[in-house]
Amino acid sequence: MNRGEQALGLGGVLATLLGVGLLVAPDRVNTGPVESLAARVAATEANTLMLGLAVAAVLLVAVAVWPRSTRDGVADRARPDDPDEDRLLGAAVETAVSGGGDPWGRLRERLVEAAVETYARRAGVPVADADAAVRSGAWTDDRLAAGVTTGDHALRAQVRLWFAPERERRRRVERTVTAIERLDER
């Protein structure tokens, strides 16, 4: 848990305790700063108050869905034996991660191919069966990695992609490569 999550958690606990206190013993809690805050909220126009709460809610959601992974070593994770091919792969990954679009689609297909090859070899199944397992997401327990191969992501992952597209695509590549590596280690 990072410091931002800890701060959000602490703020949530304190707000909950304050709310419970105001419900259970309003005369004991409604003193000093709480009384001043209550008076200020009561004097604020409803539209302004709702706008402030909406902005706060959006900020809280943005912090909550922000990806935890901040490593920049995606190209270092999957290295071919040829150094020239390694540079090309690293450049292709960086282009796909930073730009999305067609390069992202090509990178996803390379990840699908790698997952199919690994799954077929390690599970001892025909390539067609491995392809079906990978494209359906059944090849891994990691939902994000499965989403890269199926193209279907949970709402939370979609929100992350809207807020930080490059960071989320990098995170998706890392998780998929890790899932393939785990599959290969079985």
Image (cartoon, rainbow, N blue to C red):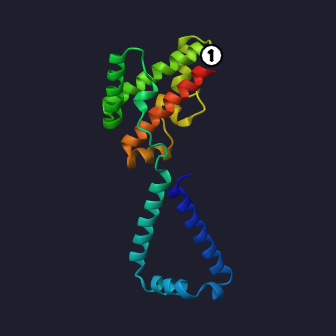
The residue singled out by tag 1 in the image is 123
Please tell me which residue is depicted at 45% across the width and 32% down the height of the picture: 173
Is residue 131 rendered to the left or right of residue 124? left
Q: Looking at the rendering, which quadrant does residue 129 occupy?
A: top right
- Regarding residue 63, the answer to whether it shows in the image is yes
Q: x, y percentage for residue 130?
A: 55, 17
Q: Which of the 4 image quadrants contains residue 45?
A: bottom left
Residue at 45 percent across and 85 percent down: it is 40
Residue that sits furthest to the right in the current view: 24
SS category of the residue bearing label 1: helix
Answer whether residue 151 is visible to the viewer in this image: no
Image vertical order of residue 106 relative to residue 9, above or below: above
Q: Position of residue 132 (x, y in %)?
A: 54, 20
Going by the picture, which residue comes out furthest to the front? 83
Q: Can you give x and y, in whole percent of width and height, for residue 29 in the image?
A: 62, 84
Which picture quadrant has residue 92?
Answer: top left
Amino acid residing under circle 1: Ala
Give the residue at x 57% y 13%: 121
Q: Which residue is more in the foreground, 180 or 134? A: 180
Q: Where residue 20 sits in the image (x, y, percent)? A: 65, 75
